[in-house]
Amino acid sequence: MDGGKFIGLIFGGIGVVLAGLAAHLCSTDAQLAGGETATDTVVEMRDDRTRAASTRNQPRANVDYRRPVIDFSTRTGTRIRFVALAGSYPEGIKVGDKVDVRCLPENPSVAEISASSRLSDGVLLLTIFGSACMVPGLVLVVLPLVQGRRRAAILARVRERGKAGSTGS
């Protein structure tokens, strides 16, 4: 296998994985959109910190951020407390704010703030990057295959003409 096909397979594989992740996020978003909704209160803001690995050229860079903790009740009256994922809530949210929450009726602990664009942004980014990997991957794998078949067909025609020309004289 030549280098172009190998690189094409790698790019295509990465593209397929990213497209699969986008499809998974899209189905999760669709499930939540059709799920149960509730309005309740932010009860606390939890401090959190990312742990970035240090590199040779850059020291470890930790980022502090706050995530809202929300208590809400399902239709059946079950109280659920969840911590919103980073980047999945509107700016400026604070303790005491009322927020709309979406959750899965069969598993209310899978919840998210309704105003979240996290999933749709993730789907968009994964689709763009997945496509950006799949297109060159397809070109690097399929184009040589098509060219190889075309070359083989041309050589077969030349051989047939050569045989026809040598037998006809």
Image (cartoon, grey):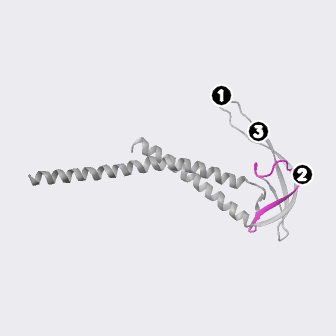
Mark 1: amino acid: Asn
Q: Nearer the viewer, residue 150 or 107?
A: 150
The residue beneath circle 1 is 57
- Label 3 close to label 1 by CB (< 8 Å): no
Which percent across, then down, holds residue 30? 69, 63
Q: Which secondary structure is most common in the magenta stretch?
A: loop
Image quadrant containing the N terminus = top left
Which percent across, then down, holds residue 108? 77, 64
Which percent across, then down, holds residue 118? 72, 53
Q: Nearer the viewer, residue 120 or 167?
A: 167
Check the image and name the residue furthest to the right.
96
Check the image and name the residue furthest to the left.
169
Q: Where on the picture, by quarter, is residue 81?
A: bottom right
Magenta-drawn segment: 85-107
Disc ID at residue 142: none
Mark 3: amino acid: Val
Q: Nearer the viewer, residue 64 or 18?
A: 18
Query: Image check: 141 left or right of 67?
Result: left
The residue beneath circle 3 is 63
Which percent across, then down, holds residue 120? 69, 55
Q: At 84% from the left edge and 67% from the top edge, which residue is drawn?
A: 78
Q: Secondary structure at mark 2?
A: loop
